[in-house]
Amino acid sequence: MAELTHITLKGFKSIKELEIGLGPINVLIGPNGAGKSNFISFFRMLNELIEGHLQLFVARSGGANAMLHYGTKVTNSIDAELYFGRGGHEHDSYEYGGYQIQLTPTEDDKLVFVKEILHFKHPTESLDNEGLESGHKKALTPEECKNLSEEAMGGGHTEALAPRWRPEESMFDEIKNVAAMVGPWIVYHFHDTSSTARIKQTGDLHENDRLEPDAGNLAAFLYMLHERHSRNYELIRSAVRRIFPRFKDFALRPSPLNLDKIRLEWQEHGSDYRFGPHQLSDGTLRFIGLATLLLQPNLPSTILIDEPELGLHPSALTLLAGMVRSASSRAQLILTTQSVSFLNEFEPEDIITIERRDSTAPLTSDSHDGLGESVFSKHDGKSLKEWLNAYSLGELWEMNVLGGRP
């Protein structure tokens, strides 16, 4: 399975400069304001970029100036490189290829591509150079990128070209395969369980291609699983019953008043009464969304979940962590958490601490050395071995051994 194994990011919001390897499971911890949300926001930007909606994302984010590290007076571009490999904590492999972008602000507060490059393994592993339109294609040195070649798509464009790029025929399959790895990166956020939340409303029965980021189409998606993937549906139902024993099953059907609509309904043991989504606790409703996301048959290649522990009982957190571990054999997961109990369910290698580092250097008009930034740290079991003989990961977090405390 191809995973995002390495990321370099410069100039994005609180992230001045980041270079880090990622594993199958990545759990981000840190105090409020450290930069967890900004890291997740970068993947939101990438997803919108690949979908062709970069400028809309920029506008909704407050403009280019708000997205650059301390604004355009300090930072003149956002630079990112993402590389894909076999995955696993023991690998930092670039073997499958990569994606590189540089974005710079315009006078009207938009972002424009300075460069956009797909790195790929040349089928002949040749080191020959060959021009291509306004860009170029060449093999990189092993020191630069593990013998990958590159397909440059030039600059000056306002939306990504990678999803629809058409290279020369001999390179088509290699480049197409790498382009397919670039997203989608969907950030799932099941926080809204208010009375007006989409998850509680009647929705379109046929909106079931994928689970929406807010689980707004949960009923339609579960209905599709019931009809086409009964094994996965039963896994979801079983998981819900483990944290909500009186739950018997979902009672999913097209609306009698409009056969193109559907609403989340359920039943409890010993009764045929149909309960609605408003009759589920917030935590149970969120758990149903999480179980559906993680137990579906066709997982997204990368799943990002923002604070999945909200409203969940400790026993539900243990079950959730088990589903995360199971899903990590088929997908890569990036999670943020503020829960000590949830952190205890993972391994040291899964943890990434994010802290806000404020420089002690004075900030002057001609220097930016005094500005703060988000700093990322990975952990490993060897360096924490003695600590873990006496304490849990959560306790080490509370003791600030892992960092990530205010």
Image (spheres, rainbow, N blue to C red):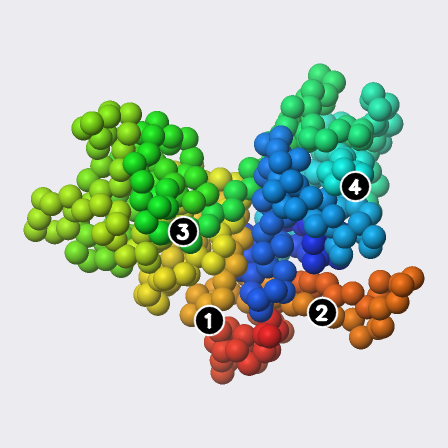
- Per the model, the C-alpha gap separating discs 4 and 3 is 34 Å
Q: Earlier in the sequence, mark 3 or mark 2?
A: 3
- Per the model, the C-alpha gap separating discs 2 and 1 is 23 Å
| Tag nearer the camera, 3 or 2 | 3
In the picture of the structure, the residue carrying the numbered disc 2 is 357
Q: Are marks 4 and 2 in contact (CB under 8 Å)?
A: no
* Type of amino acid under label 4: Thr
Residue extending farthest to the front is 108
Q: Residue 85, can we see it?
A: no
| Tag nearer the camera, 1 or 4 | 4
- In terms of depth relative to the viewer, which is nearer, 295 or 363? 363
- In terms of depth relative to the viewer, which is nearer, 246 or 328? 246
As drawn, the label of residue 104 is 4
In the picture of the structure, the residue carrying the numbered disc 3 is 192
Q: Earlier in the sequence, mark 4 or mark 2?
A: 4
Name the image quarter holding the C terminus.
Answer: bottom right
* Type of amino acid under label 2: Arg
- Per the model, the C-alpha gap separating discs 3 and 1 is 23 Å
Q: Earlier in the sequence, mark 3 or mark 1?
A: 3
